Image (spheres, rainbow, N blue to C red):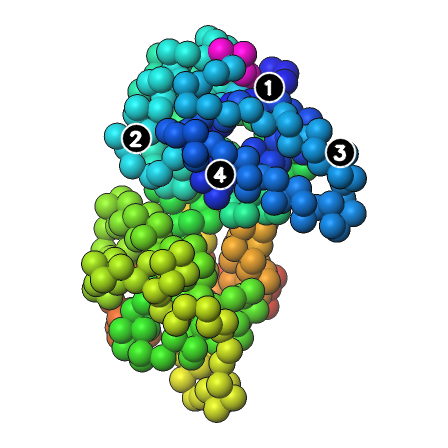
Amino acid sequence: MNIKQVGLVGGGVMGAGIAQTFSSFDYPVYLKDVSDELVRKCIGQAEKIYLSAVKKGKFTEEQAKRKLSLIKGGTGGEGFDQVDLVIEAVPEKIPIKKEVFTFLDRICKPGAILATNTSSLSISLIGTFTSRSDRVIGMHWFNPPHVMKLIEIVSGIETSHEVVDSVIDFCGRLGKIPVQVKECAGFLVNRILGIYMNEALFMLEEEGTPALIDQAAINLGMPMGPLMLGDMVGWDVIYHSNRTLHEEYGTRFALPKLFSKMIEEGKLGQKVKNGIYPAGQDFTCPEHLKSDARLQVLSNRLLFVMLNEGIRCLEEKVASANNIDRALQLGAGMPRGPIAWADESGLDILFQGLEQFKAMYGERFWPSPLLRRLVQAGYLGNKSGKGLSIIT
């Protein structure tokens, strides 16, 4: 299917970056939001992205102006009858999604693809809000969308192969890297990041030292610590996503008590100038904490829950080993993907560490059944010459 024009519902931070990406590749964009003010704000954010690109020499002023003019917006869905693909980027609430997709199904031409940018909700459920569930697909972008290369492509139960192929091809034309992911709560990247963020908050309940926890992640090679990341993304966004993970996966994803307390107290992060860190404070770890004896244990806790969840995703065929590793490197900034990292670390070492942490902290460290079987059979990773890489 040849995608020539696109629609976008929801002009928030994600919407602005997505709209700018489309227009930068000369695709006309029709934007819909609930008020003219929000439409103007979205186009203004896209303009700021273009101004930054001009300063960096990526576009001339004339090119940027022409590309920005490709973004048209309103509150009534003008132009949506012409689009070949629509992306929805509204809040992660099913009633809102239902309203949007019912509207899109009515106004868009029969052959149009309806995509959702949801990070955790069911594509199959969203498809039932339309008469074209075979043309509904997950197209999950990462923030900031005009910068991040990864897009998770998620099929619902009835999504057609033609639609999947068309969207994957379209992502390539946008200079993005699409990774096809099996439908499940959290999909791939947010599922693994979800248990990692939970663990950081469990640590905060115990240790009460944010800088120590974030330094433990930085020692692993992560681009920033989980608590600083949470302040940037917004703890309400993460809470909603992680609650979905808990509903689907059970006690392994039980939420720390601190989480709901933060939400109740309005400690949502930088957007409200109230989070884990004081408003405007950049993360810096005091020198005396960089040699703290607790760091290695904290690093291992963060690492082991991510590697174990990555192995569970491999076992459930959420994605191939290569795609799991590629997605986590692109979408989460991991220095190595969880599958390669587990093989490199030693599957027996990982298994033993998980068992020890399980005895101390509970079910969230329960080793993946696949990991247990491999270790029992002597598949220990790189050091034995055979490990997770054999799984297809």
Residue 254 is left or right of residue 167, and the answer is: left
N-term-proximal mark, 4 vs 1: 1
N-term-proximal mark, 2 vs 3: 3
Q: Residue at x 38, y 75 (%)?
A: 210
Pointers 4 and 3 in contact (CB under 8 A)?
no
N-term-proximal mark, 4 vs 3: 4
**Spot occupied by residue 144 in the image (x, y as percentages of width and height):** 54, 48
Q: The disc labelled 1 sits on which kind of residue?
A: Gln
Q: CA distance from mark 1 to mark 3?
A: 19 Å
N-term-proximal mark, 1 vs 3: 1
Query: How many numbered markers are drawn?
Result: 4
Q: Is residue 50 above or below residue 155?
A: below
Mark drawn on residue 5: 1
- Which residue in the rendered view is the most extreme toward the top? 110
Residue 104 is left or right of residue 65, and the answer is: left
N-term-proximal mark, 4 vs 2: 4
Q: Is residue 378 above or below residue 178?
A: below
Q: Which residue is mark 2?
A: 96
Task: Tell me, yes or no, if residue 154 can be seen here.
Answer: no
Residue 175 or 335: which is nearer the viewer?
175
Task: Tell me, yes or no, if residue 13 can be seen here.
Answer: yes
Mark drawn on residue 54: none
Q: Which residues are magenta?
A: 80-84
Residue 116 or 274: which is nearer the viewer?
274
* Callout 3: SS: helix
Q: The disc labelled 2 sits on which kind of residue?
A: Ile
Q: Which residue is mark 3?
A: 63
Q: Which residue is mark 4?
A: 41
Q: Nearer the viewer, mark 4 or mark 1?
A: 4
